[in-house]
Image (tube, helix red, strand yellow):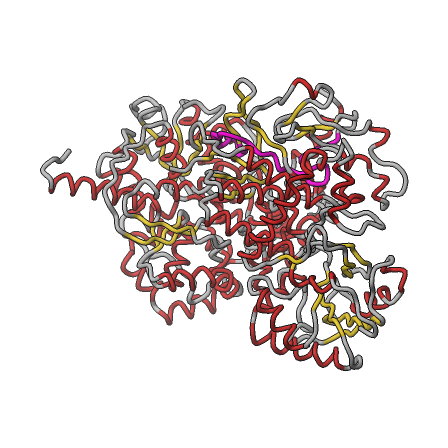
Amino acid sequence: MPSADVAVIGAGLAGLLTAVRLAENGARVVVLSEGNGALHWAGGPIDLGFRPGARTAAAVVGQLARRRAHPYAVLGADVAPALDWFQRLTGDLGLPHAGSLSGGFGALPTGIGGIRPVSIVPEAQAATLQPWAPGERLVIAGHAGYKDFWPRAVASSLARPEVWGGFSRPDRVVGVALDWPGLRERRNLNALRIAEHFDDPDWRAAALDVTARGVASTGSGPVRVGLPAVLGLRDHPRVLEDAIQRFGAPVIELPLVPPGIPGIRLHDVLRAKLRALGGRILIGERVARVEVTEATVTAVATEAATREVLTRVGALVLATGGVAGGGLVGDPDGAIREMVLGLPTDGPPIERWLHGDPLNPASLPIAGAGIRTDEALRPVDPRRPARGPLFGNVRVVGSLLAGQQWMIDRSGDGVALASAWRAAASLAGTTASATRSSRTTEAVR
Amino acid sequence: MTIASVVDEALHETVGLSTDECLKCNICNEVCPVARVDDRFPGPKYVGPQAQRFRLAAPVPINLDGRPVHSPDRTVDWCSGCGWCTTACPAGVKIAEVNNRARASMRAGHRPRLRDWLISQTDLLGRFGAPFTPLANWTLQNRAVRWLIELVLGIHRKAPLPLYAGRSFRSRFKRRGGVLGRAGEVDLPPPDRAVVYFHGCAANYYEQHVADAAIGVLERNGFQVIAPPQNCCGLPMISNGLYPAARSKARHNLDVLAEYARLGYRIVGTSTSCTHTLKAEYAEMLDLHDEDARAVSEATWDICEFLLDLHEEGRLDSGFGRIDLDLPYHAPCQLRSHGIGLPAMDLFALIPGLRAVDMDHDCCGIAGTYGLKKEKYDIAMRVGEDLFRRVEASGAAETACDSETCRWQIASATDRPSRHPVEYLAAAYAAADAAGTAAGTAH
């Protein structure tokens, strides 16, 4: 008999991790999501927090936790155990993540020729955590006709020392544009199509050959090879192994514009894990309303043409994202609405939602809007937090939590991990009141 | 009411304007089964939200001089209409619907291609073919004839066409005293003891065993079944961009079904694509927003959705006998568009011994009439290939699926039967009866 002890709304990193953790603890979980989550845009790194000049992620987490408004003020202590669990989980699922809270930062070159400070990265970006040796060069290689990745342009940007912002950097950066087999005739090439090509062992061998010759043409001596993040989808571990072996050098996958292949890989294994644990994941389900009895959510109604489907739940996890993810919507009259329960939100007044340079993260205070919670991640009224939780069986996770300037703090993934960990722990033992049921609201029965 | 809510409503009322929510994030391109296998289709984003900038928002866009405006990107015709883009879109853009409307506006004002017109006429084909079942089936199975059909019409010679099953379901149902009339013409039990059956063309002409199974299961649960006059739901025409013809089919169905819906009867269908058309596409594609359309939409249930609802109300006879079987199950794209989860899997779980496995594959490729077409057959086969290989590797003797054209595609590609979920429920009741008889405790 299908039923949901816990319904998780949202299928991004926070939602999927909460669901997997709950399912590991024995809960029957259903994930309901309006569409595919933001992991499909993700480039690979797990951001726990960064500040210019900081030496370790642990130090930044500590700093942020001392700020009362940041979710780490509540969750800071859970970042370490959550990360430990995440690294064991993804390792078991064939997508190990390197790095640690205390291991320091590296600089990950990106597909637009910038760098991104990273502390936790998938295996294919692990080489960025090692300092560059004297004389070591970075070769940026890619297919010449692929519109989302221009190897020579990327290399010429990365050749400027100031781009590396004080991080250890290569001695020399060279770009080579290659002709990967059979792609010249292809139209509409995107990262996913090339990744699927890499899954094919024969094509892969040929493409890696071409690439190895291109890398060799740039000279000899110690080298790392930067490639667009397209090294396979389903067979990624084998593609990576083959590439490293063929080049005899470390490989770095550079994050690209969406679709984000590293994020899709993570999404796919988490989804498969959830299903293997008996969890359900339903995409294309927009929540229309919830049923509440005495500050307890008893059911979630999702839209189904002119009717709705009612899922009876023991608990509800909101992983709907913030303003960027659609969990919050700002109205022209200045109200910031939470879209599922209509929870009271905490955020700046409308005059301060945006100001100044739109490309500067510091000019987007609206990004910090969200829901305030108690220690168990139950929502509270931000103006009357002392009155306690508004709903006993609701938890808020991920970027819906108020007080994150994730583009500045770079703590978005750490909040997702720690809040998933905390929410799952605090919901241990929850069971459903009844089962998923389908009901007309207006039709006569 | 605030100005914001008025603006909000205006923006979301039409499918076309939902593209205003598009972030250009590429998730739709990433899930598109057709773009996955063929470069000729640039993907839903390019022909949908992107190209929509060049289209007007009116249902049939017209120029200032009154001529229809065509899509600037004719590659929209490679879209199979599976609807995955809409399902996966995190911003709520009705991408598949936008693309289907774009195709219809391309077709508007032109005479349809003979092939597209013909494969859309599912009840015409049924009505004329069924009386000549042996001849028609010989024709459909004859390789030389099929080659000729491909040459002349453009229907691929290997495309999975169904075989006629002789007398139609309606005429058999009439013979055994079934109720076929319109509301008001017939005496009926109250709505909690009778349902309207929308059999669709498939159960009427090709798969009467599905109709029989459905009626058996419904009757066992205390429902009298009514099969009022009905024609094709119109989906094949919608898929081929022939909206005016689809509207006339829809109008006829709505006239008959709305009478029942208003009396409180639920409309139950065994074709998950027909039920989705009644529920959603009359409004979303054909702009039928009147009271009849609304009443029918609210009253329509896919049969598994209906039976699961009975179960959750404690009204389903769950005395299922044992069926020892490994059963790969494919959830059709149209079922996902219902937004009701996978009710068949929940029902399978009630049958002792039945080990159903959700194959978790996006699309079998056929997409109604898409995979029948000569130029699209190969795309359809590649879209479903992974599903077919995994079914074969599973060693299972048969598969289950809620939609008829998917069943025909999967059965043909894997060379083993594919059945409707309700057939297993009927078989499980029969198994219970047989066991009861054997034990001397028959009902």
What residue is at 60 percent from the left and 40 percent from the top?
A420
**Most foreground residue, B282 or A403:** A403
Snapshot quadrant of residue A328: top right
Quadrant of the snapshot with the C terminus of chain A: top left
**With A129 as the anchor, is B342 left or right in this view?**
left
* In the rendered image, the vertical position of residue B367 relative to residue A240, given as above or below: above
Q: Is residue B377 visible?
A: yes
Magenta segment: does it hold A370?
A: no
What residue is at 24 percent from the left and 40 percent from the top?
B429
* In the rendered image, the vertical position of residue A295 relative to residue B150, given as above or below: above
* In the rendered image, the vertical position of residue A340 relative to residue A252, given as above or below: above
Q: Which residues are magenta?
A: A302-330
What residue is at 42 percent from the left and 53 percent from the top?
B405
| Number of numbered discs on residues | 0
**Most foreground residue, B427 or B42:** B427
**Most foreground residue, A129 or B432:** A129
Chief secondary structure of the magenta portion: strand
